[in-house]
Amino acid sequence: MLEGKFITLGVTGGIAAYKAADLASKLKGRGAAVHVIMTRSAGEFVRPLTFEALTGNPVYTDLFSSSGAFRIPHIELACRAEIMVLAPATANLLGKLAHGIADDLLTSAVLAATCPVLICPAMNVNMYANRVVQENLARLAQYGYHLVEPAVGRVACGHVGRGRLAGTEEIIGAIEGLVSRAGDLKGLTVLVTAGGTREPIDPVRYVSNRSSGKMGYALAAAAAARGARVILVSAPVSLTVPPGVEPVQVESALEMHQAVMRYYPEAQVVIKAAAVADYRCQTVSGRKIKKEGEGLTLDLVKNPDILADLGRNKRPGVTLVGFAAETHDLEENARKKLERKNIDLLVANDVTMPGAGFGSETNIVKIFYAGGKMDSLPVMDKSAVAHRVLDAVLEIRRRD
């Protein structure tokens, strides 16, 4: 699978840099053309000569050096790469990339890359758990970067926990998965919905739900990275639109319904990941409702069912994917919804489970197919879940 693939391997200054030598060797052994960029601090742990001997290619360390095979290394090592792998990725590197800082060869090359970028963090247990590091990782995932989570074990300083560089074979498996997926959605238009709709009560208040939009945005980023044209219909969220994605901002369920029906004729794949309110206020006050009396009664009416409307108007060649957030009887409810809505796939999760609730960086889902098949996935970051959902979409499209 990696035969002849151009891989740019970025090595930063952590003790796990010695494991990057094993990674480079095994990638070379599988036929890949491995080109290594080392930061200055990485050279304090492993000498460039080691990687030159293992890969058979020059090692690049200096942004302004003209030595080696490439005249402008940070551009050519980025643009020629079919995947960039950052292993080990230190907390310092994560912070730079999350905020667009390009002050050396490696960070400049990553910012110039248009291929998938796989981040393999390794650091002290407490550093990895630090809120700032976790926020940087979440930001990078939102931008479309891919992550191989560190392993749990004893790190060099003696602490035990999550922080060890993932195993070489796990990293290679992730590389193979990303390389095989590159461009496999090219030519398709994917319509994704995300976020929780807001149903106004008055000019100040609204009824909504706990959806953060992270799953929908991860789906949009993954589809764009795989070559699709992506239209993202989003309710209000505190997220940045992924690169290459066409945003359509809405607020209420009625607005989302209108936007989805508008763009539906252009799409070959529709993924309804938004948490759309089932009800809206029958009457919206034009003024702020004052706190008077002992209580307030809201008269609610049903919102249109966007997914059901899509299922009723399903066009040949279109793949429809729904999401279901459940709190009990997940499989029974999911299978009923799949049949009732006339869709191809349903992705369901139990939001009461740790690691699967609203706002989490991870998810635990089951993917239900119209033919009765079910895939049960372990806890995974939402970017990985997004790719598994897209894999299922392609499985259906190739079969049909």
Image (tube, rainbow, N blue to C red):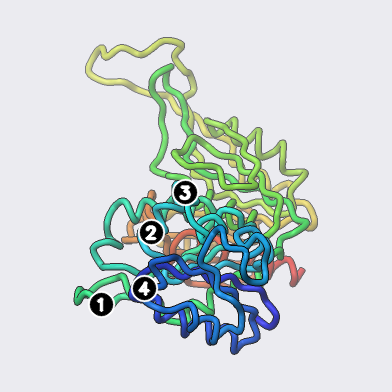
Q: Residue 17 placed where, x, y %? A: 40, 76
Q: Label 3: which residue?
A: 101
Q: Circle 4 sits in a helix, a strand or a loop, which is it?
A: helix
Q: Residue at x 53, y 54 (%)?
A: 218
Label 1 vs label 2: CA separation?
31 Å
Q: Tell me: residue 211, above or below residue 68.
A: above
Question: Which mark lies nearer to you, 3 or 2?
Answer: 3
Q: Residue 191 placed where, x, y %? A: 66, 47
Q: Label 1: which residue?
A: 156
Q: Residue 209 placed where, x, y %? A: 40, 39
Q: Label 4: which residue?
A: 44
Question: Which mark lies nearer to you, 1 or 2?
Answer: 1
The quadrant in which residue 72 appears is bottom right
Instruction: Tell me the number on the disc at residue 356.
Output: 2
Dot 1: within a 10 Å radius of its alpha carbon, few (fewer than 14), some, or many (20 or more) residues?
A: some
Please, what is the three-letter code of the amino acid marked with disc 3?
Answer: Ile
